[in-house]
Structure formats: structure tokens, C-alpha cells
Image (cartoon, grey):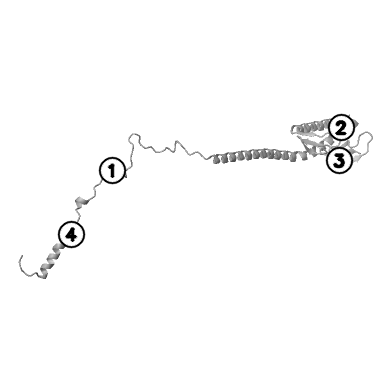
């Protein structure tokens, strides 16, 4: 070592050399200190598949979700209610239709009864006149013609369900008879129909027109 004096420049270079040497000593070896990867760690995140039986997703078409028991009961109760309501509606519809037909028949037949009564009175008058004057051929023909028309009219009313109510000699029935007056009688009991002022008629099982009668006191 020489006895040459050390200059500030030389001291600076020495400090840099010491710093570089310490840096080289503390820098880790990238190749030696790098962590080694284990083969088992690399496969840890991968799903394990059994090669003997592959995984199978459930078939939703083969096993549909069945409704709960409460839902089944609710649907059954609703079905029963709907069926009961339909039966009631069907019965009401049938009854309403039959009632409408009956009312229509009554509206047509009731005015015809007045014509039938006039024809009956004409027939009675012709029969009385025939007894008084039976020698006239034209009058006899007229009486027979009225009788034929009356019989045809009566048969037609019977075909549509119109029948006459029996009144004379029967006990008074307010459901079928209409009392116009009362009359004392020694031959009939009280409440018996003595005479018929206007005949009454039924349409099937219902009264179409009440019979107007005279009742014994």
C-alpha cells in the first residue's frame, strides 16, 4: 500500500463499491429461492370425476314436481262447487224454459176460451130452435154445422192440454171455482155448487180459468 494521500474522489468510489457489494450479498437468488409447485397443489381446484360412472344430471321430465296435498284438496273442492253450481243452473234453466212455454200457451189460449163460450151458446140456441122448428132443412143444416165446429174446437183444445173443470154438484173449491153468488137450496148441502155461470178450464195440471158458479148457502 502506497503512502499516496486519499482524495475525496477516491473515497466516493470506495463507498459505491461497498454499497454494490452489500446489495449483491442481500439479493436473493431468483432461481434458488422460488417456491417449488407441487403436482398435488395444481390439481386441487379441478373437479374429481369418477371414470367408472359419469355424473348425470337429474331428468326433470321424468320426475315432475307433484302438487302439494293442500293444492289437490283445494282444486277438488273447487271442482265440486262448480259442478253443483252447474247442476243448479241447469235445473233453473229447465224450469224457466217450461214456465215460459206455459205462460205463452196461456196467453194464446185464454182469449180463445171466450170464443169457445160464444160458440157453445150459439150451439145451445140452435138446439133449442131446432126443437121448436124442426121442419126447416136449412136451419137443421146450420145447427149441424155449428155442432161440428164446436166438436172440432173442443177436440183441438183437448189436444193442447185444455180440459173443462167440473163444477155443478161438486163441493166448492176456491182453487178451481169463483163464487159469484149464494143461493138457498133444500136439495143441496151448504157449500155445494148449484149452477155454473161460466165454465172453467185447466191447462195440464194448472187452472187456466176459474169456473164462475152459484153456491148453496
Which residue lies under the disc numbered 2?
127
Q: Looking at the rendering, which quadrant does residue 45 occupy?
A: top left
Could you tell me residue 59's position as x and y percent?
Answer: 42, 37
Inter-mark Cα distance, 1 to 3: 118 Å
Q: Looking at the rendering, which quadrant does residue 180 occupy?
A: top right
Which residue lies under the disc numbered 3?
179
Inter-mark Cα distance, 3 to 2: 29 Å
Which residue lies under the disc numbered 4?
23
Inter-mark Cα distance, 4 to 3: 142 Å
Inter-mark Cα distance, 1 to 2: 132 Å
* Between marks 1 and 3 in the image, the one whose residue lies nearer the viewer: 1
- Residue 40: mark in rendering: 1
Q: Looking at the rendering, which quadrant does residue 192 occupy?
A: top right
Could you tell me residue 140's position as x and y percent?
Answer: 85, 30
Q: Residue at x 80, y 36 (%)?
A: 201
**SS of the residue under disc 2:** helix
Q: Compared to 16, does 104 lie above or below?
A: above
Q: Residue at x 11, y 70 (%)?
A: 8
Inter-mark Cα distance, 4 to 2: 158 Å
**SS of the residue under disc 3:** strand
**Nearer-the-camera pick, 144 or 212:** 212
Decide which of tag 1 and tag 2 comes sooner along the chain. 1
Decide which of tag 4 and tag 3 comes sooner along the chain. 4
Q: Residue at x 86, y 40 (%)?
A: 179
Question: What is the quadrant of the N terminus in the image?
Answer: bottom left
* Between marks 1 and 2 in the image, the one whose residue lies nearer the viewer: 1
**SS of the residue under disc 4:** helix
Q: Residue at x 75, y 39 (%)?
A: 106
Amino acid at each position: 500500500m502506497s503512502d499516496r494521500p486519499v482524495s475525496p474522489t477516491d473515497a466516493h468510489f470506495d463507498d459505491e463499491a461497498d454499497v454494490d457489494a452489500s446489495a449483491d450479498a442481500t439479493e436473493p437468488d431468483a432461481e434458488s429461492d422460488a417456491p417449488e409447485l407441487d403436482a398435488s397443489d395444481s390439481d386441487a381446484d379441478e373437479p374429481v370425476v369418477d371414470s367408472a360412472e359419469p355424473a348425470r344430471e337429474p331428468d326433470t321430465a321424468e320426475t315432475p314436481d307433484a302438487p302439494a296435498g293442500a293444492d289437490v284438496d283445494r282444486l277438488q273442492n273447487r271442482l265440486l262447487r262448480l259442478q253443483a253450481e252447474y247442476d243448479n243452473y241447469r235445473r233453473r234453466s229447465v224450469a224457466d224454459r217450461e214456465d215460459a212455454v206455459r205462460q205463452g200457451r196461456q196467453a194464446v189460449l185464454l182469449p180463445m176460451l171466450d170464443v169457445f163460450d160464444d160458440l157453445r151458446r150459439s150451439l145451445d140456441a140452435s138446439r133449442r130452435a131446432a126443437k121448436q122448428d124442426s121442419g126447416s132443412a136449412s136451419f137443421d143444416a146450420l145447427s149441424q154445422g155449428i155442432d161440428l165446429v164446436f166438436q172440432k174446437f173442443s177436440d183441438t183444445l183437448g189436444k193442447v192440454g185444455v180440459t173443462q173443470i167440473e163444477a155443478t154438484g161438486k163441493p166448492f173449491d176456491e182453487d178451481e171455482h169463483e163464487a159469484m153468488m149464494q143461493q138457498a137450496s133444500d136439495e143441496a148441502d151448504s157449500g155445494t155448487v148449484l149452477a155454473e155461470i161460466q165454465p172453467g178450464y185447466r191447462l195440464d195440471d194448472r187452472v187456466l180459468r176459474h169456473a164462475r158458479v152459484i153456491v148453496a148457502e
